[in-house]
Image (tube, rainbow, N blue to C red):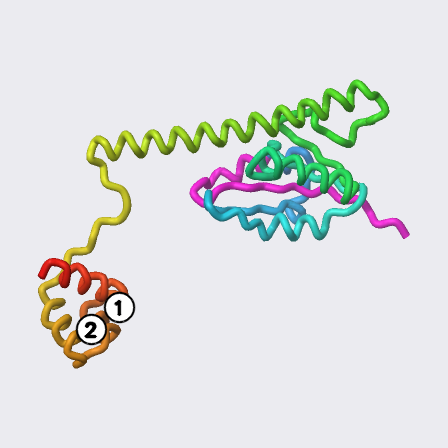
Amino acid sequence: MNREKEVFGYVRVSAKDQCEERQILAMREFGVPDGCIYIDKMSGRNFERPQYRKLMQKLGSGDVLVIKSIDRLGRNYTEMQEQWRHITREKRSDIVVLDMPLLDTRQEKEDLTGMFIADLVLQILCYVAEVERENIRQRQAEGIAAAKARGVRFGRRRMPVPEEFYPLWEKYRKGEITARKAAGKLGVVHSTFLKWGKFHERKL
């Protein structure tokens, strides 16, 4: 008995970006059921994609994967190309890229010219996506460097050392109290207590 072909959607946004609704609306307009939309949120450094992995386990021959743009498949040119090949050749599933109608593998592929153009567009879009990512990273780095040059400080402000710390530090040095107990009295974690202590020792 042949399994019924399904349509899936994949949405990926960064942890700071809350605009997944735009991608979800595009999936719904295409006709992807809500229960078949897989969403990953992640930071820029962490590219673990648990929902994508679940989707890959579900995706089968003849199924359709809908994505908003080609860069949803990976972080760089190589990864996007690898995922495209994995889905279309190994999984034997179709892909629809909503932002680029030409990248729709459901279309007939008997036309050699059409196949060539689609493959060429895929490679160009993967390349452009990676270049844009690098440009954004460079602009961010330049912006941070310019801000630092203006005296802007990044990160959390250093917590001021309370006066109660110093007698507790002396007790800790003498072995009369543990770092955790001393930190608890100050309402901080023990690593902060030890960091204050190292800074205090350097000043002596």
On the image, which quarter does residue 103 sit in?
top right
Three-letter code, disc 1: His
Q: Which residue is mark 2?
A: 182
197, above or below 124, in the image: below
Q: Is residue 24 visible?
A: no
Q: Secondary structure under badge 1?
A: helix
Binning the other alpha carbons within 10 Å of mark 2 as few (below 14), some (14 to 19) or many (20 upward) gives many
Residue 144 in percent (x, y) is at: 31, 34
Residue 158 in percent (x, y) is at: 20, 52
Residue drawn at (79%, 41%) of the image = 92
Q: Which residue is mark 1?
A: 190
Q: Is residue 103 visible?
A: yes
168, above or below 200, in the image: below
On the image, which quarter does residue 173 sit in?
bottom left
* Residue 53 is one of the magenta-drawn residues: no
Q: Are marks 2 and 1 in contact (CB under 8 Å)?
A: yes
In which quadrant will I find the C terminus? bottom left
Extreme right residue here?
A: 1
Extreme bottom residue here?
A: 176
| Near-viewer residue (77 or 43) | 77
Residue interval drawn in magenta:
1-25
Residue drawn at (22%, 61%) of the image = 195
Residue drawn at (28%, 46%) of the image = 155
Three-letter code, disc 2: Ala
Q: Secondary structure under badge 2?
A: helix
Residue 27 in percent (x, y) is at: 63, 37
Taking the image as shown, residue 148 lies to the left or right of residue 43, namely: left
| Near-viewer residue (133 or 103) | 133
